[in-house]
Amino acid sequence: MKNTLSQGNFDSSDSIKNNKVLLISSILLTVFIIAVAYHYINGYYFRSGYPLNTFLFRPPVRFSDYFQVYDITKQFNNSQSGFIAYFPFTHLILSILTLLPAKVGFLFMSLSFLCMLFLQMRFFVVDKIPTKILRYQTALVLSLLTYPTLFALDRGNIEIIIYIFLGFFFYFYYVKKSKWLSILFLGAAIGMKMIAAVFLILLISDKKYRELLYVFLTTVFFTLSGYASMIITTGKSVAQIIRAAQDSTNLYFFNYVLEWQGLTHSHSLWNFFKIYKLIWNLDSDSQYALNIYTLVILAIIGLVVLYIIFIEQEDWKKITLLVLSMILFPYASGDYTLIYIYFPLTFFIMAKKQTRNELFYLFTFSFLLLPINYFYFDFPISKFPYLHGDISYAVIIYPLAMALLMSKIVYDGLYSRFGRYSLFSLKAKKSTSN
């Protein structure tokens, strides 16, 4: 059976597609209004401070993910600092943004992301809604009034640039079927963040091995371009640049993986161990637990890859499994990475073939776009001064929802493929024959 999206069959029944879209948008709008009202009442009437007065991050450090890396990039290029924030190609992109005033660069990056997301919703999600006003209203609700979008903008995180590159990859790979442009944008995304390489599994699944090689070469080219730009700009050697990258990585690993900075507003599966340590006030060896976690996750990823390549037939489910692997399994995964849920959601809505348990998938996708930061763990600040009282139950609930979604996809796929050969089926046939 050929993939439905690979054949370009994006036109599901208008009424079925619209029912999906309108239900999701209604859920998002309703919960968004409730969330805003809840936090506004807490902040204005009950005079509650952070985190009860917002579902976003601490207001004093709004947009700091962008402005901090902007300063770090500029200082490194001016030889005033020995740290770089990200991979060489990411550093190159940030260096280009530093040619603009910081606020202008931030505005350009944010508006580019919003335009990309709105057009994605407009032309591939709400396009079958007959009324023009309702079409644009729904597109605005889906693209702007969601927790991942607002959180990504609130942080100013560069994930929104990676989202743009991946958006173009999906567009040229599935819609325009432009081999070279899809290769270019996937290589750029991987060059910015290595975890984006999970989407190479789509090429393997589609038996596009030559394109796989081209993506690798493209990624190498972008990475070398980043190194070259740093050498030219700073006059540093390759060894000095690698050392700066290692120092930055080690600092990030210590603070966000082994320590607690990566826990607030995040959804990594690794959160479960951190919460366990905090609840029981344990002083256990995080590195040992991390080694076990790594082995388990690698095994799970291996099984997911095998499932995608040999069993799964629907492209939206493949994309869902890869996106969830990309944002659930890393040691640290901020809530801004929830924006990637838009990709499987878009393909789910576009899929021509109706899916078993469709309402389950629809509600789960919707749930992952909702703010659920209402209840918080009561860790005493005096005992844990590195925390800010903003570790909500969402750090556990989001990962559970993602794990449930992945499990459901795999279960449905295995049942569809092998269910008729199961032990229960054989018993049923035997009892019927008797």
Image: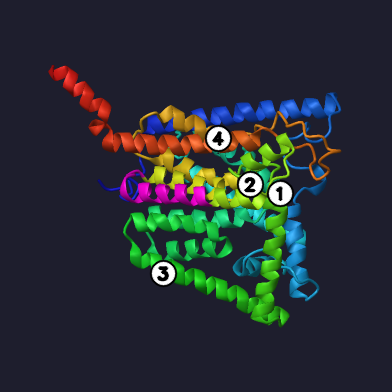
Instruction: Find the distance from the CA under tag 4 to the CA under tag 1.
Output: 24 Å
Image quadrant assignment for residue 149: top right
Q: Earlier in the sequence, mark 2 or mark 1?
A: 1
Eyeballing the image, is 46 above or below 246? above
Q: Quadrant of the N terminus?
A: top left
By secondary structure, the bulk of the magenta-drawn segment is best described as: helix
x and y, in percent, of residue 254 in the image = 71, 56
Image quadrant assignment for residue 178: bottom left
**Amino acid on which disc 4 is placed:** Leu
Mark 3 packing: few (<14 Cα in 10 Å), some, or many (20+)? some
Q: Earlier in the sequence, mark 2 or mark 3?
A: 3
Q: Are marks 2 and 1 in contact (CB under 8 Å)?
A: yes
Q: Which residue is under mark 1?
A: 155
Q: Earlier in the sequence, mark 4 or mark 2?
A: 2
Q: Are marks 2 and 3 in contact (CB under 8 Å)?
A: no
Q: Which residue is under mark 2?
A: 336
Q: Nearer the viewer, mark 4 or mark 1?
A: 4
Residue range highlighted in magenta: 295-314
Q: Which residue is under mark 3?
A: 214
Eyeballing the image, is 288 above or below 370? below
Which secondary structure lies at badge 2?
A: helix
Which secondary structure lies at badge 4?
A: helix
